[in-house]
Image (spheres, grey):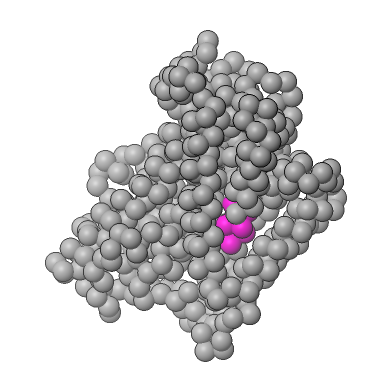
Protein backbone atom coordinates (compact mmCIF):
# COMPACT_ATOMS: atom_id res chain seq x y z
CA UNK A 1 0.00 0.00 0.00
CA UNK A 2 1.41 3.37 -1.05
CA UNK A 3 0.40 6.97 -0.42
CA UNK A 4 -1.07 9.06 -3.22
CA UNK A 5 1.79 11.46 -4.09
CA UNK A 6 1.26 15.23 -4.03
CA UNK A 7 1.01 16.93 -7.45
CA UNK A 8 4.07 18.26 -9.25
CA UNK A 9 4.28 21.72 -10.91
CA UNK A 10 2.39 22.19 -14.18
CA UNK A 11 5.64 22.74 -16.10
CA UNK A 12 6.83 19.25 -15.17
CA UNK A 13 3.46 17.74 -16.16
CA UNK A 14 3.90 18.67 -19.81
CA UNK A 15 4.62 15.69 -22.02
CA UNK A 16 1.94 13.03 -22.50
CA UNK A 17 -0.52 15.42 -24.15
CA UNK A 18 2.11 16.47 -26.69
CA UNK A 19 2.55 12.86 -27.71
CA UNK A 20 -1.13 12.11 -28.18
CA UNK A 21 -1.59 15.45 -29.99
CA UNK A 22 1.27 14.56 -32.32
CA UNK A 23 -0.43 11.24 -33.11
CA UNK A 24 -3.19 13.14 -34.86
CA UNK A 25 -1.12 15.74 -36.71
CA UNK A 26 -0.31 13.46 -39.62
CA UNK A 27 -3.81 12.07 -40.13
CA UNK A 28 -6.74 14.31 -39.23
CA UNK A 29 -4.88 17.61 -38.99
CA UNK A 30 -2.55 17.45 -42.02
CA UNK A 31 -4.47 15.16 -44.39
CA UNK A 32 -8.16 14.46 -43.77
CA UNK A 33 -9.62 17.79 -42.60
CA UNK A 34 -7.53 19.92 -45.01
CA UNK A 35 -8.53 17.54 -47.81
CA UNK A 36 -12.22 18.10 -47.04
CA UNK A 37 -11.69 21.87 -46.75
CA UNK A 38 -9.94 22.00 -50.12
CA UNK A 39 -12.88 20.25 -51.78
CA UNK A 40 -15.93 21.41 -49.80
CA UNK A 41 -14.93 24.63 -48.06
CA UNK A 42 -14.88 25.57 -44.37
CA UNK A 43 -18.53 24.91 -43.53
CA UNK A 44 -17.45 21.58 -42.00
CA UNK A 45 -15.04 23.16 -39.47
CA UNK A 46 -17.55 22.47 -36.69
CA UNK A 47 -16.85 18.75 -37.11
CA UNK A 48 -13.16 19.19 -36.37
CA UNK A 49 -13.82 21.23 -33.23
CA UNK A 50 -16.52 18.85 -31.97
CA UNK A 51 -14.35 15.82 -32.69
CA UNK A 52 -11.37 17.04 -30.67
CA UNK A 53 -13.67 18.19 -27.86
CA UNK A 54 -15.12 14.68 -27.68
CA UNK A 55 -11.61 13.26 -27.53
CA UNK A 56 -10.63 15.61 -24.70
CA UNK A 57 -13.31 14.17 -22.42
CA UNK A 58 -12.60 10.64 -23.64
CA UNK A 59 -8.89 11.02 -22.90
CA UNK A 60 -9.46 12.45 -19.43
CA UNK A 61 -11.41 9.38 -18.35
CA UNK A 62 -8.54 7.24 -19.62
CA UNK A 63 -6.12 9.41 -17.64
CA UNK A 64 -8.36 9.16 -14.56
CA UNK A 65 -7.89 5.40 -14.41
CA UNK A 66 -4.09 5.57 -14.77
CA UNK A 67 -3.85 8.41 -12.26
CA UNK A 68 -5.71 6.41 -9.61
CA UNK A 69 -4.45 2.91 -10.34
CA UNK A 70 -0.88 3.54 -11.50
CA UNK A 71 -1.43 1.06 -14.35
CA UNK A 72 -2.78 1.22 -17.88
CA UNK A 73 -6.47 0.80 -18.67
CA UNK A 74 -5.58 -2.45 -20.43
CA UNK A 75 -4.69 -4.08 -17.12
CA UNK A 76 -8.02 -3.01 -15.65
CA UNK A 77 -10.07 -4.03 -18.68
CA UNK A 78 -8.47 -7.48 -18.72
CA UNK A 79 -9.73 -7.99 -15.16
CA UNK A 80 -13.26 -7.11 -16.31
CA UNK A 81 -13.28 -9.02 -19.61
CA UNK A 82 -10.88 -11.88 -20.25
CA UNK A 83 -11.00 -11.44 -24.04
CA UNK A 84 -10.06 -7.74 -23.87
CA UNK A 85 -6.31 -8.31 -24.56
CA UNK A 86 -7.03 -10.31 -27.71
CA UNK A 87 -9.46 -7.66 -28.95
CA UNK A 88 -6.98 -4.81 -28.42
CA UNK A 89 -4.15 -6.66 -30.17
CA UNK A 90 -6.39 -7.50 -33.15
CA UNK A 91 -8.12 -4.12 -33.49
CA UNK A 92 -4.86 -2.19 -33.08
CA UNK A 93 -2.97 -4.10 -35.75
CA UNK A 94 -5.92 -4.02 -38.16
CA UNK A 95 -6.52 -0.30 -37.57
CA UNK A 96 -2.95 0.94 -37.75
CA UNK A 97 -1.10 -1.71 -39.74
CA UNK A 98 -1.94 0.16 -42.97
CA UNK A 99 1.06 2.52 -43.49
CA UNK A 100 -0.84 5.44 -44.98
CA UNK A 101 0.81 8.16 -42.89
CA UNK A 102 4.38 7.28 -43.79
CA UNK A 103 3.28 6.82 -47.42
CA UNK A 104 1.99 10.41 -47.40
CA UNK A 105 5.25 11.67 -45.86
CA UNK A 106 7.27 9.78 -48.47
CA UNK A 107 5.14 11.11 -51.34
CA UNK A 108 5.67 14.70 -50.21
CA UNK A 109 9.39 14.07 -49.78
CA UNK A 110 9.50 12.42 -53.20
CA UNK A 111 7.94 15.56 -54.71
CA UNK A 112 10.63 17.69 -53.07
CA UNK A 113 13.59 15.58 -54.20
CA UNK A 114 12.19 14.44 -57.55
CA UNK A 115 11.63 10.75 -56.77
CA UNK A 116 8.35 9.52 -58.27
CA UNK A 117 8.60 5.95 -56.90
CA UNK A 118 8.15 7.09 -53.31
CA UNK A 119 7.56 3.62 -51.86
CA UNK A 120 11.34 3.18 -51.50
CA UNK A 121 11.52 6.37 -49.47
CA UNK A 122 8.66 5.07 -47.31
CA UNK A 123 10.50 1.81 -46.69
CA UNK A 124 13.64 3.71 -45.69
CA UNK A 125 11.61 5.92 -43.30
CA UNK A 126 10.04 2.90 -41.61
CA UNK A 127 13.48 1.35 -41.06
CA UNK A 128 14.80 4.66 -39.68
CA UNK A 129 11.93 4.84 -37.17
CA UNK A 130 12.70 1.31 -36.04
CA UNK A 131 16.34 2.23 -35.44
CA UNK A 132 15.38 5.45 -33.57
CA UNK A 133 13.09 3.63 -31.15
CA UNK A 134 15.45 0.67 -30.71
CA UNK A 135 18.55 2.65 -29.70
CA UNK A 136 17.05 5.17 -27.27
CA UNK A 137 17.71 5.07 -23.53
CA UNK A 138 13.98 5.03 -22.87
CA UNK A 139 11.34 5.03 -25.58
CA UNK A 140 9.17 7.60 -23.78
CA UNK A 141 12.05 10.07 -23.59
CA UNK A 142 12.56 9.91 -27.36
CA UNK A 143 8.86 10.44 -28.03
CA UNK A 144 8.45 13.39 -25.65
CA UNK A 145 11.46 15.35 -26.89
CA UNK A 146 10.75 14.72 -30.57
CA UNK A 147 7.08 15.64 -30.50
CA UNK A 148 7.51 18.78 -28.37
CA UNK A 149 10.21 20.11 -30.70
CA UNK A 150 8.21 19.49 -33.87
CA UNK A 151 4.96 20.95 -32.50
CA UNK A 152 6.63 24.11 -31.18
CA UNK A 153 8.20 24.71 -34.61
CA UNK A 154 5.40 23.53 -36.95
CA UNK A 155 2.36 25.21 -35.37
CA UNK A 156 3.84 28.76 -35.34
CA UNK A 157 5.08 28.26 -38.91
CA UNK A 158 1.62 27.22 -40.11
CA UNK A 159 0.10 30.20 -38.24
CA UNK A 160 2.52 32.54 -40.01
CA UNK A 161 1.58 31.09 -43.41
CA UNK A 162 -2.13 31.51 -42.65
CA UNK A 163 -1.65 35.13 -41.54
CA UNK A 164 0.19 35.82 -44.79
CA UNK A 165 -2.34 34.11 -47.07
CA UNK A 166 -5.81 34.44 -45.48
CA UNK A 167 -8.08 37.43 -46.09
CA UNK A 168 -10.79 38.77 -43.85
CA UNK A 169 -13.36 36.87 -45.89
CA UNK A 170 -11.44 33.63 -45.32
CA UNK A 171 -11.41 34.14 -41.55
CA UNK A 172 -15.13 34.95 -41.70
CA UNK A 173 -15.76 31.70 -43.60
CA UNK A 174 -13.92 29.80 -40.85
CA UNK A 175 -16.00 31.49 -38.17
CA UNK A 176 -19.22 30.61 -39.98
CA UNK A 177 -17.95 27.06 -40.48
CA UNK A 178 -17.56 26.61 -36.74
CA UNK A 179 -21.29 27.32 -36.55
CA UNK A 180 -22.06 24.83 -39.33
CA UNK A 181 -22.67 27.42 -42.04
CA UNK A 182 -20.95 26.80 -45.37
CA UNK A 183 -21.17 28.28 -48.84
CA UNK A 184 -24.68 27.27 -49.86
CA UNK A 185 -25.14 24.59 -47.22
CA UNK A 186 -25.55 23.99 -43.49
CA UNK A 187 -23.55 21.36 -41.57
CA UNK A 188 -22.70 18.97 -44.43
CA UNK A 189 -22.32 19.85 -48.13
CA UNK A 190 -23.96 17.88 -50.88
CA UNK A 191 -21.70 15.24 -52.39
CA UNK A 192 -19.41 14.80 -49.39
CA UNK A 193 -18.52 11.20 -48.60
CA UNK A 194 -19.89 10.37 -45.17
CA UNK A 195 -17.10 7.81 -44.74
CA UNK A 196 -14.49 10.51 -45.40
CA UNK A 197 -16.18 12.90 -42.95
CA UNK A 198 -16.48 10.17 -40.32
CA UNK A 199 -12.80 9.27 -40.82
CA UNK A 200 -11.77 12.89 -40.27
CA UNK A 201 -14.08 13.18 -37.26
CA UNK A 202 -12.56 10.07 -35.69
CA UNK A 203 -9.05 11.44 -36.30
CA UNK A 204 -9.73 14.84 -34.72
CA UNK A 205 -6.92 14.14 -32.30
CA UNK A 206 -5.45 10.66 -32.04
CA UNK A 207 -8.17 8.12 -32.88
CA UNK A 208 -8.75 4.42 -32.49
CA UNK A 209 -7.00 2.60 -29.67
CA UNK A 210 -4.27 5.25 -29.68
CA UNK A 211 -6.28 7.27 -27.18
CA UNK A 212 -5.82 4.44 -24.70
CA UNK A 213 -2.03 4.85 -24.76
CA UNK A 214 -2.60 8.07 -22.84
CA UNK A 215 -2.89 5.85 -19.77
CA UNK A 216 0.50 4.28 -20.56
CA UNK A 217 2.20 7.64 -21.14
CA UNK A 218 0.64 9.03 -17.96
CA UNK A 219 2.01 6.05 -16.08
CA UNK A 220 5.47 6.45 -17.61
CA UNK A 221 5.51 10.20 -16.90
CA UNK A 222 4.75 9.42 -13.25
CA UNK A 223 1.34 11.07 -12.85
CA UNK A 224 -0.33 10.18 -9.54
CA UNK A 225 0.12 6.54 -8.65
CA UNK A 226 2.13 6.16 -11.86
CA UNK A 227 5.03 7.48 -9.79
CA UNK A 228 5.67 3.90 -8.71
CA UNK A 229 5.59 2.41 -12.24
CA UNK A 230 8.61 1.45 -14.34
CA UNK A 231 9.49 2.53 -17.89
CA UNK A 232 10.15 0.69 -21.15
CA UNK A 233 13.89 0.76 -21.95
CA UNK A 234 15.39 0.88 -25.40
CA UNK A 235 16.04 -2.49 -26.99
CA UNK A 236 19.83 -2.10 -26.82
CA UNK A 237 19.94 -0.02 -23.62
CA UNK A 238 18.03 -2.21 -21.16
CA UNK A 239 20.15 -3.79 -18.47
CA UNK A 240 19.39 -7.26 -17.23
CA UNK A 241 18.22 -6.03 -13.85
CA UNK A 242 15.68 -3.62 -15.27
CA UNK A 243 14.04 -5.46 -18.12
CA UNK A 244 11.25 -7.25 -16.26
CA UNK A 245 8.36 -4.89 -15.65
CA UNK A 246 5.41 -5.39 -13.35
CA UNK A 247 2.20 -4.27 -15.08
CA UNK A 248 -0.06 -3.89 -12.04
CA UNK A 249 -0.17 -0.65 -10.12
CA UNK A 250 -0.16 0.16 -6.43
CA UNK A 251 -3.10 0.86 -4.10
CA UNK A 252 -3.67 3.61 -1.53
CA UNK A 253 -5.94 4.30 1.44
CA UNK A 254 -9.03 6.36 0.69
CA UNK A 255 -8.27 8.99 3.32
CA UNK A 256 -8.65 12.77 3.21
CA UNK A 257 -5.02 13.47 2.34
CA UNK A 258 -4.93 11.03 -0.56
CA UNK A 259 -8.28 12.26 -1.93
CA UNK A 260 -7.06 15.85 -1.70
CA UNK A 261 -3.89 14.93 -3.60
CA UNK A 262 -5.96 13.17 -6.27
CA UNK A 263 -8.18 16.23 -6.74
CA UNK A 264 -5.16 18.52 -7.03
CA UNK A 265 -3.64 16.21 -9.64
CA UNK A 266 -6.98 16.05 -11.48
CA UNK A 267 -7.22 19.82 -11.80
CA UNK A 268 -3.68 20.13 -13.10
CA UNK A 269 -3.85 17.32 -15.66
CA UNK A 270 -7.15 18.74 -16.97
CA UNK A 271 -5.40 22.08 -17.45
CA UNK A 272 -2.37 20.43 -19.09
CA UNK A 273 -4.49 18.36 -21.46
CA UNK A 274 -6.81 21.26 -22.20
CA UNK A 275 -3.98 23.62 -23.12
CA UNK A 276 -1.85 21.17 -25.06
CA UNK A 277 -4.19 18.63 -26.60
CA UNK A 278 -7.47 20.53 -26.98
CA UNK A 279 -6.29 24.10 -27.61
CA UNK A 280 -3.15 23.43 -29.67
CA UNK A 281 -4.86 20.53 -31.45
CA UNK A 282 -7.92 22.59 -32.41
CA UNK A 283 -5.71 25.52 -33.40
CA UNK A 284 -3.53 23.31 -35.63
CA UNK A 285 -6.53 21.67 -37.32
CA UNK A 286 -8.36 24.92 -38.00
CA UNK A 287 -5.24 26.70 -39.26
CA UNK A 288 -4.39 23.82 -41.62
CA UNK A 289 -7.98 23.76 -42.89
CA UNK A 290 -7.89 27.52 -43.44
CA UNK A 291 -4.52 27.31 -45.23
CA UNK A 292 -5.83 24.52 -47.46
CA UNK A 293 -8.96 26.56 -48.23
CA UNK A 294 -7.07 29.75 -49.10
CA UNK A 295 -4.52 28.03 -51.32
CA UNK A 296 -6.35 25.16 -53.05
CA UNK A 297 -10.13 25.51 -52.79
CA UNK A 298 -11.60 25.08 -56.26
CA UNK A 299 -8.39 23.71 -57.79
CA UNK A 300 -9.00 20.74 -60.08
CA UNK A 301 -7.68 17.28 -59.13
CA UNK A 302 -7.81 18.07 -55.38
CA UNK A 303 -9.82 14.91 -54.85
CA UNK A 304 -7.02 12.66 -56.11
CA UNK A 305 -4.97 11.20 -53.26
CA UNK A 306 -3.02 13.89 -51.41
CA UNK A 307 -2.62 16.07 -54.52
CA UNK A 308 -4.09 19.00 -52.58
CA UNK A 309 -0.96 19.08 -50.37
CA UNK A 310 1.27 19.40 -53.44
CA UNK A 311 -1.09 22.07 -54.80
CA UNK A 312 -0.72 23.97 -51.52
CA UNK A 313 3.05 24.00 -51.90
CA UNK A 314 2.70 25.24 -55.48
CA UNK A 315 0.27 28.01 -54.47
CA UNK A 316 2.50 29.16 -51.60
CA UNK A 317 5.48 29.18 -53.97
CA UNK A 318 3.59 31.38 -56.45
CA UNK A 319 2.09 33.83 -53.91
CA UNK A 320 5.02 34.06 -51.47
CA UNK A 321 8.31 32.53 -52.62
CA UNK A 322 9.82 29.19 -53.69
CA UNK A 323 11.66 28.97 -50.37
CA UNK A 324 8.46 29.32 -48.33
CA UNK A 325 6.68 26.77 -50.53
CA UNK A 326 9.52 24.32 -50.05
CA UNK A 327 9.58 24.93 -46.27
CA UNK A 328 5.84 24.22 -46.14
CA UNK A 329 6.27 20.85 -47.85
CA UNK A 330 9.21 20.03 -45.58
CA UNK A 331 7.07 20.88 -42.53
CA UNK A 332 4.27 18.62 -43.79
CA UNK A 333 6.76 15.82 -44.44
CA UNK A 334 8.26 16.13 -40.94
CA UNK A 335 4.85 16.27 -39.22
CA UNK A 336 3.72 13.17 -41.05
CA UNK A 337 6.97 11.39 -40.21
CA UNK A 338 6.74 12.16 -36.49
CA UNK A 339 3.10 11.03 -36.49
CA UNK A 340 4.13 7.66 -37.93
CA UNK A 341 6.88 7.52 -35.30
CA UNK A 342 4.30 8.09 -32.57
CA UNK A 343 1.82 5.65 -34.06
CA UNK A 344 4.37 2.84 -34.25
CA UNK A 345 5.46 3.51 -30.67
CA UNK A 346 1.92 3.69 -29.31
CA UNK A 347 0.55 0.68 -31.16
CA UNK A 348 3.58 -1.39 -30.15
CA UNK A 349 2.96 -0.41 -26.53
CA UNK A 350 -0.71 -1.37 -26.79
CA UNK A 351 -0.06 -4.77 -28.32
CA UNK A 352 2.95 -5.52 -26.11
CA UNK A 353 1.09 -4.73 -22.91
CA UNK A 354 -1.91 -6.80 -23.92
CA UNK A 355 0.28 -9.71 -25.03
CA UNK A 356 2.02 -9.52 -21.66
CA UNK A 357 -1.32 -9.48 -19.84
CA UNK A 358 -2.36 -12.63 -21.70
CA UNK A 359 0.93 -14.33 -20.85
CA UNK A 360 0.65 -13.41 -17.19
CA UNK A 361 -2.94 -14.66 -17.07
CA UNK A 362 -2.16 -18.04 -18.65
CA UNK A 363 1.34 -18.70 -17.27
CA UNK A 364 0.75 -17.04 -13.88
CA UNK A 365 3.95 -14.98 -14.14
CA UNK A 366 4.07 -11.87 -12.01
CA UNK A 367 6.63 -10.04 -14.14
CA UNK A 368 7.29 -9.92 -17.85
CA UNK A 369 9.99 -8.67 -20.25
CA UNK A 370 7.81 -5.91 -21.72
CA UNK A 371 10.64 -4.22 -23.63
CA UNK A 372 11.34 -7.37 -25.66
CA UNK A 373 7.65 -7.87 -26.54
CA UNK A 374 7.38 -4.18 -27.47
CA UNK A 375 10.16 -4.44 -30.02
CA UNK A 376 8.78 -7.66 -31.50
CA UNK A 377 5.51 -5.84 -32.29
CA UNK A 378 7.36 -2.73 -33.47
CA UNK A 379 9.40 -4.62 -36.05
CA UNK A 380 6.42 -6.80 -37.00
CA UNK A 381 4.50 -3.65 -37.97
CA UNK A 382 7.46 -2.24 -39.84
CA UNK A 383 7.84 -5.51 -41.74
CA UNK A 384 4.12 -5.56 -42.59
CA UNK A 385 4.29 -2.00 -43.90
CA UNK A 386 7.32 -2.81 -46.04
CA UNK A 387 5.54 -5.87 -47.43
CA UNK A 388 2.54 -3.77 -48.48
CA UNK A 389 4.79 -1.26 -50.22
CA UNK A 390 6.61 -4.03 -52.07
CA UNK A 391 3.20 -5.16 -53.38
CA UNK A 392 2.49 -1.53 -54.41
CA UNK A 393 -0.24 -0.97 -51.80
CA UNK A 394 0.76 2.64 -51.26
CA UNK A 395 -1.96 5.27 -51.98
CA UNK A 396 -1.76 7.46 -48.82
CA UNK A 397 -5.24 8.96 -48.44
CA UNK A 398 -7.01 5.67 -49.20
CA UNK A 399 -4.91 3.85 -46.60
CA UNK A 400 -5.47 6.60 -44.01
CA UNK A 401 -9.24 6.71 -44.63
CA UNK A 402 -9.61 2.93 -44.41
CA UNK A 403 -7.64 2.89 -41.17
CA UNK A 404 -9.68 5.76 -39.74
CA UNK A 405 -13.00 3.99 -40.35
CA UNK A 406 -11.72 0.82 -38.68
CA UNK A 407 -10.38 2.86 -35.77
CA UNK A 408 -13.66 4.72 -35.32
CA UNK A 409 -15.33 1.38 -34.60
CA UNK A 410 -12.55 0.57 -32.13
CA UNK A 411 -13.20 3.92 -30.42
CA UNK A 412 -16.87 3.08 -29.99
CA UNK A 413 -15.85 -0.12 -28.20
CA UNK A 414 -13.21 1.33 -25.90
CA UNK A 415 -15.23 4.41 -24.90
CA UNK A 416 -17.96 2.10 -23.62
CA UNK A 417 -15.56 -0.30 -21.88
CA UNK A 418 -13.39 2.28 -20.14
CA UNK A 419 -16.21 4.38 -18.83
CA UNK A 420 -18.23 1.41 -17.62
CA UNK A 421 -15.11 0.21 -15.79
CA UNK A 422 -14.51 3.61 -14.18
CA UNK A 423 -18.15 3.77 -13.12
CA UNK A 424 -18.22 0.31 -11.57
CA UNK A 425 -14.82 -0.08 -9.88
CA UNK A 426 -13.72 3.47 -9.07
CA UNK A 427 -14.47 4.71 -5.52
CA UNK A 428 -17.19 7.38 -5.66
CA UNK A 429 -14.96 10.31 -4.52
CA UNK A 430 -12.67 9.56 -7.48
CA UNK A 431 -15.37 9.12 -10.14
CA UNK A 432 -16.33 11.60 -12.85
CA UNK A 433 -18.93 14.28 -12.17
CA UNK A 434 -22.41 13.56 -13.54
CA UNK A 435 -22.00 16.05 -16.39
CA UNK A 436 -18.76 14.41 -17.52
CA UNK A 437 -20.49 11.03 -17.50
CA UNK A 438 -23.31 12.50 -19.61
CA UNK A 439 -20.83 13.88 -22.17
CA UNK A 440 -19.06 10.53 -22.45
CA UNK A 441 -22.38 8.75 -22.99
CA UNK A 442 -23.08 11.16 -25.86
CA UNK A 443 -19.61 10.41 -27.30
CA UNK A 444 -20.32 6.68 -27.06
CA UNK A 445 -23.68 7.00 -28.81
CA UNK A 446 -22.32 9.25 -31.57
CA UNK A 447 -19.47 6.88 -32.42
CA UNK A 448 -21.86 3.95 -32.27
CA UNK A 449 -24.31 5.60 -34.66
CA UNK A 450 -21.54 6.70 -37.02
CA UNK A 451 -19.99 3.21 -37.00
CA UNK A 452 -23.29 1.45 -37.74
CA UNK A 453 -24.18 3.90 -40.50
CA UNK A 454 -20.79 3.60 -42.20
CA UNK A 455 -20.74 -0.20 -42.00
CA UNK A 456 -24.31 -0.44 -43.33
CA UNK A 457 -23.53 2.04 -46.10
CA UNK A 458 -20.44 0.13 -47.24
CA UNK A 459 -22.02 -3.33 -47.05
CA UNK A 460 -25.46 -2.57 -48.47
At 53% from the left and 10% from the top, the residue drawn is 184
Q: Is residue 298 left or right of residue 417?
A: right
Residue 195 rendering spot, x and y as whole percentages? 61, 31
**Does residue 393 appear in this view?**
no
Q: Is residue 294 left or right of residue 72?
A: right
- Stretch of the chain drawn in magenta: 339-347
User: In the picture, residue 136 is in which quadrant?
Assistant: bottom right
Q: Give the position of the N terminus as an image quadrant.
A: bottom left
Magenta stretch containing residue 365, yes or no?
A: no
Q: Main secondary structure of the magenta part?
A: helix
Q: Image height check: is 361 above or below 302?
A: below
Residue 83 rendering spot, x and y as whole percentages? 54, 61
Q: Give the position of the C terminus as an image quadrant.
A: top right
Residue 217 rendering spot, x and y as whole percentages? 45, 63
* Furthest residue in direction bottom, as rendered: 241
At 22% from the left and 60% from the top, the residue drawn is 264
Magenta stretch containing residue 345, yes or no?
A: yes
Of residues 258 and 29, the one nearer the viewer is 29
Residue 179 rendering spot, x and y as whole percentages? 40, 22
Q: Is residue 271 left or right of residue 452?
A: left
Q: Image height check: is 40 above or below 57?
A: above
* Furthest residue in direction top, as rendered: 184
Of residues 111 and 15, the one nearer the viewer is 111
At 63% from the left and 74% from the top, the residue drawn is 135
User: In the picture, residue 92 is in which quadrant?
Assistant: bottom right
Amino acid sequence: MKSFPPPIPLKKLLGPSFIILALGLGSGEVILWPYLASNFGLGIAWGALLGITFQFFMNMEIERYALVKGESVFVGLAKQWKHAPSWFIFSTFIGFGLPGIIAASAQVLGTLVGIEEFKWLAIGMLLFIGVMLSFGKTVYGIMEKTTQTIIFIAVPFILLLVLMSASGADWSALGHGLLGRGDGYNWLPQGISFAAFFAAFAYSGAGGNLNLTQSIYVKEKGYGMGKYAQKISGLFRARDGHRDISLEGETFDLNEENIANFRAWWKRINLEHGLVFWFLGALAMLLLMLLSYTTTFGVSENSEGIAFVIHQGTAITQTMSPIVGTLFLIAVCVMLFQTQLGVLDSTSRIMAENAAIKRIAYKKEKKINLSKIYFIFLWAQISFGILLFLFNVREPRLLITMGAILNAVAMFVHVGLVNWMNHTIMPRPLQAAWWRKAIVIVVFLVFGAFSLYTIFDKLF
